[in-house]
Amino acid sequence: MRVRFWGTRGSIPVALTSADMRDRLAQALLQASGRSFANYEEAYAFAASELDFSLTHTFGGHTPCVEIEAPGNEYYVCDMGSGARPFGAHVLAKQARRPATVNIFQSHVHWDHIMGFPFFGPAYVPGTKIRIHGVHDVLEQAYRLQQSPPCFPVPFDQLGASIEFVKLEVDKPYRVNDITVTPHLQLHGGDSYGFRFERDGKSVVYSTDSEHKLEDRHEAEAFAGFFRNADVVIFDAMYALAEAISVKADWGHSSNIVGVELCQMAHAKHLVLFHHEPANNDATLEGLLKEARRFEELTRGDVPLKVSAAYDGLEIDL
Amino acid sequence: MNFSARRYANAVVLRVEGRLDQDTCDAFRNDLLGHVEESAHGGGAIVLDLSGLEYVSSAGLRCFMLASRQAKTQKGRIFVAALQPMVAEIFEISHFNLVFQVFGSVKEALAAVSADAVAAFQKG
């Protein structure tokens, strides 16, 4: 399996500004002072290997949309945030006019998690099959609502694809082709659900929009069970811990530190910080990543936990 | 973990020893909030002497946060002092150093509370 991140930001999409771009260019030129490049390839190699991460990348970007790529002809994707637009372009290019079959797994229906669907190209292609899986009773209602007048010019019923809503039950494993998918209830306004994907001995957990009450041992153990031995855990790390349990307590999100603790309890292999706070710039997000890595070092047991921060375009092979 | 309290004028120093994590935080939270209710009001202060604290998890940090919140509602104050290097780093990593006033020693923290408190501490 391969995990491909199309949207990693929480709440609302963000973009680098012109001022951000100029600042990066100026800093890159400073770092390249005295160097000369014979061609684009040499300059690209320099940028890729020698410049700071915060100059050559941005954490993005789009709101949540994460593809789980698996062998076979179908697509698997968690949430339809604004990252669904580039994901849709990818599907259309890959299909080369052949209709696609896309399996969507919906954590919940807050707007940042569905806002990309009206811009998801394959939804307009006749012959395309889209199955939207989720636990919420209001799943179909939410998808239809955002495409109802006066919010959007194309009503849901006019989409060319055949669209089916598949109701899942919590903690019940489902087979979708050769992937086993299990939804798990999470603490969030209106409820959210994490999904554990298992195939061929490998596992990925998508757990976003999930607050953890630290004093509740039963809850922590339940999540450790859900994350148990996962190869990758994609985790809602919207805030620093102090923020998450003070001014932003009960906002339905978690922190980098709690992500490390739960993954350590679960003996998971790779924690990916996700659902970045839109007010945080790249330097702040890089700081939160460094702090999570240092906390992991300080509290490491027998086996190290790899810690990364998701960005739009990141791919992780299992 | 162990927990002991000693009063110096309008401040109470709470000495915390051992590991503060999910296994120990329930009992600690109840004791701590009891002391805060009793002492951190009307300008009174609690100084958490963390020189004996070996480790604190997110659950433990939440106890400190609850204590801070309660002290504020009572118009009291709460300070932390004498953190071991690992606990100091965890405070920074979790951004708790932005929430609490952190002092290098109990004496420095008591000096921030009142002249009477630090004088009482120096008398022993």
Image: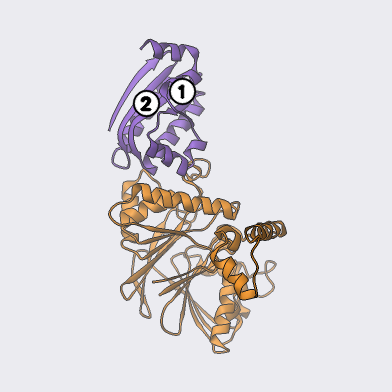
Chain colours: A orange, B purple
Q: Is residue A60 shown left or right of residue A215?
A: right
User: Which quadrant is home to the N terminus of chain A?
Assistant: bottom left
Q: Is residue A307 visible?
A: yes
User: Foreground residue, A132 or A13?
Assistant: A13
The residue that mark 1 highlights is B109
Q: Position of residue B55 (x, y in %)?
A: 34, 39
Residue furthest to the front in view is: A34
Q: Residue at x 43, y 18 (%)?
A: B11
Neighbourhood count class around disc 1 (C-alpha, 10 Å): few under 14, some 14–19, many 20 upward:
many
Picture mark count: 2
Q: Is residue A83 visible?
A: no
> In the displayed structure, would residue A115 be above or below residue A276?
below
**Amino acid type, mark 2:** Gly
Q: Secondary structure at mark 1?
A: helix
Q: Position of residue A23 (x, y in %)?
A: 68, 56
Q: Position of residue B108 (x, y in %)?
A: 46, 22
Q: Position of residue A180 (x, y in %)?
A: 35, 73
User: Foreground residue, A19 or A125?
Assistant: A19
Q: Is residue B110 shown left or right of residue A56?
A: left
Q: Is residue A298 shown left or right of residue A79?
A: left
Q: Residue at x 45, y 59 (%)?
A: A308
Q: Chain of mark 2?
A: B
Lower sequence index among marks 2 and 1: 2
Q: Residue at x 40, y 14 (%)?
A: B121
- How far is mark 2 from mark 1, CA to CA? 21 Å
Q: Which mark is residue A174?
A: none
Quarter of the view holding residue B2? top left
Q: Chain of mark 1?
A: B
Q: Secondary structure at mark 2?
A: helix
> In the displayed structure, would residue B71 be above or below residue A227?
above
The residue that mark 2 highlights is B34
**Amino acid type, mark 1:** Ala
